[in-house]
Image (spheres, grey):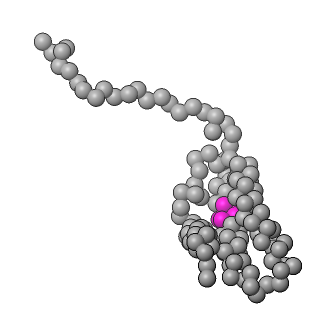
Amino acid sequence: MLSFMSIAELCLAAYLLVLSIRGKSKLFKSPYVTEGKEVQYRKTSRAGFITVSVLLVLLALMEPLADVLPESIYSWLLPALSAAVLLSPMVLYIFLVRLTDKFKRSKPARPVAPRAAFFFDEDKK
């Protein structure tokens, strides 16, 4: 039987896999992508999210396989998969940051003056 953590991992993996296959999420769009590298950014992020979702599925299925797999394989496979699941989003982030433009991120946004909550008719006398 699966534990709550395994079920949560499977749900997250399914969600990431659906987003990766559809490719219409805001995860694949960034205003800071270097011009001309939008397609590469999209392909890299899709491949990265598919990789993360496959690793999550494998990690979630390790619990039911604990009885079937020999202890010698299970003892190194579980920590290896856990480390891969933790490190893969970090590696994906590094690749995606390299496709963004540093100067677009450093430009400050144009400040917007706050609007008054109330308007008084003191000027019209």
Looking at the figure, which quarter contains the C terminus? top left
Reply above or below: 34 against 67: above
Toward which corner of the image does residue 1 lie, by quadrant? bottom right
Residue 95's x, y, as percent? 74, 54
Reply above or below: 37 against 64: above
Residue at 66 percent across and 61 percent down: it is 45
Using the image as rendered, state which of residue 34 and residue 25 is in the foreground.
25
Q: Which residue lies furthest to the bottom in this view?
A: 68
Toward which corner of the image does residue 72 lie, by quadrant? bottom right
Residue 87 lies in the magenta-colored region: no
Residue 40 is at least partly visible in this image: no
Residue 67's x, y, as percent? 74, 85
Toward which corner of the image does residue 69 lie, by quadrant? bottom right
Residue 78 is at least partly visible in this image: yes
Q: Is the magenta stretch mostly helix, strand or loop?
A: helix
- Decide if residue 122 is on the left or right side of residue 103: left
Q: Residue furthest right?
A: 72
Residues drawn in magenta: 44-49
- Decide if residue 122 is on the left or right side of residue 28: left
Q: Residue furthest left?
A: 125
Residue 46's x, y, as percent? 65, 65
Residue at 68 percent across and 66 percent down: it is 52
Residue 105's x, y, as percent? 63, 39
Residue at 53 percent across and 33 percent down: it is 109
Residue at 30 percent across and 26 percent down: it is 116
Using the image as rendered, state which of residue 101 and residue 93 is in the foreground.
93
Q: How many marks?
A: 0
